[in-house]
Image: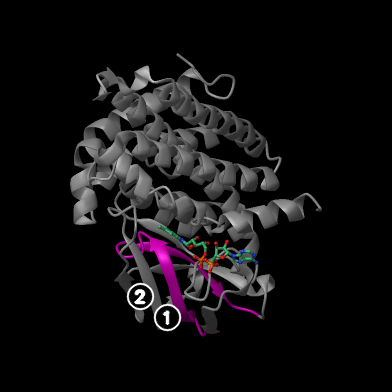
Amino acid sequence: MVTRAPYYTERHEAVRAAVIAFAEAEIAPHAHAWDEAEDFPRDLYGKAARAGVLGAGFPEAYGGRGGDIFDKIIVKEELARVGSGGVRASLMSHGIGLPPILKLGSAAMKDRVAPAVLAGEKISCLAITEPSGGSDVANLRTTARLDGDAYVVNGEKTLITSGFRADYYTVAVRTGGPGKDGLSLLLVERGAPGFTQTRLKKMGWWASDTATLRFEDCRVPAANLIGEENAGFTGIVLNFNEERLGNTAIMLGAAKACLEVTIEHARTREVFGKVLMANQVVRHKIADMAMRVQATESRLDTVAWQFERGEGPVAEIALLKNLAAETYEHCASEAVQLHGGAGIVRGGRAERLFRESKILSIGGGATEIMKDLAARQMDL
Ligand SMILES: Cc1cc2nc3c(=O)[nH]c(=O)nc-3n(C[C@H](O)[C@H](O)[C@H](O)COP(=O)(O)OP(=O)(O)OC[C@H]3O[C@@H](n4cnc5c(N)ncnc54)[C@H](O)[C@@H]3O)c2cc1C
């Protein structure tokens, strides 16, 4: 059954069914243990590739499964709803690492990198944020100076998802003067001399690997430049639109999970001799959660459609990301509240969803920055 027509077709629903089956079988049973271990097995990438999860929405020419932005939305939403935030974050880090290579990279680079990543043999990630700040991308400080046939990279990146165990790093560097016109994108590979990584511990998404990267006179072949020198900012910005639509799908999926676990709990938990759901105030809380979820879902589908048609809905995406963050934070808070003390105990779904609910109002562009961006786009 196609539930979100006209945007989703029977084919999309088959993708959705496959992703749900994968998440239920391969992630959900292990979500808590992997969070506690702050890790998940590397062979999950291969399993995800074979289930069509990694390749959804990526070109078949490079081993993807084809499709459009809705395929990518389905994967993110369902992995967040059924699976685990942390596993999804690292498992899908190629979702932000690979598009700049596919859009701007040389044919040789695409052929070498994309099929291995989409087959789950190699891990790709995106490294933009620096310790000096992630919001002000145009002023990032990591430098890359051309020296013969290599760039010499110096600087630091932080909060990089899959940063510890990735094989391919799509890194934003300064090759020119100050500001956005001096930025380029460079493919840095695991094992490059002068390149080291340190793991970070986080409030949520424990199973995902997040790292600080350090480049000390790190030599990277000049052929690893992604696109034109000093034209990296456009690539970064184009990537942001898709990333933020994806962030919205993730937060929508997580908000749906909050709603589902709350309904289940309210139907079964007895207090004062009756189930929680028998109280009007509880039903109203749940109706309020559903209202926010429905509004976010509906807006996501519309804006994704505008994106797919090439309308470049920058302001719409920025505001949508903020709407999704509010929806998720509200639903996660209510889920824990209605679970009572059980919602506080480590290992329950409501508890995990709550501690993950702050991440994406910061990651991928913080709420304040999204408002500023939208306001500029709207000529306010
Ligand atoms: C779990 C996690 C995973 C991440 N993964 C990646 C990744 O894979 N790759 C990557 O490159 N980055 C990643 N990030 C980084 C993320 O994109 C940044 O955290 C984000 O862009 C914000 O940058 P910052 O943390 O340096 O905050 P800052 O830029 O220091 O901003 C701090 C706060 O100040 C606010 N602020 C800043 N300027 C203004 C202003 N002018 N007016 C009003 N308010 C302002 C911001 O909105 C924010 O709330 C990740 C972050 C997290 C938490």
Q: Is residue 287 magenta?
A: no
Residue at 42 percent across and 80 percent down: it is 219
What is the magenta range? 147-176
Identified by mark 1, the residue type is Arg
Residue 130 location in percent, x, y? 49, 72
**Looking at the image, which residue sits at the far top?**
1
Between residue 98 and residue 319, name the one nearer to us: 319
- Is 227 placed left or right of 219 in the picture? right
Q: Earlier in the sequence, mark 2 or mark 1?
A: 2
For numbered disc 2, what is the local secondary structure? loop
Which secondary structure dominates the residues rendered in magenta?
strand
Q: Is residue 158 magenta?
A: yes
Q: Quadrant of the N terminus?
A: top left
Residue at 56 percent across and 19 percent down: it is 5
- Is 373 placed left or right of 129 in the picture? right
Check disc 2: other Cα within 10 Å, few if <14, some if 14-19, many if 20+: few
For numbered disc 1, what is the local secondary structure? strand
Check disc 1: other Cα within 10 Å, few if <14, some if 14-19, many if 20+: many
Residue 152 location in percent, x, y? 47, 83
Residue at 52 percent across and 45 percent down: it is 325
- Is 145 placed left or right of 30 in the picture? right
Residue at 67 percent across and 74 percent down: it is 179
Identified by mark 2, the residue type is Ala
- Per the image, the residue denoted by label 2 is 192
Distance between the alpha carbons at the discs numbered 2 and 1: 7 Å
- Per the image, the residue denoted by label 1 is 219
- Quarter of the view holding residue 203: bottom left
Between residue 323 and residue 68, name the one nearer to us: 323
* Tag 2–tag 1 contact (CB < 8 Å): yes
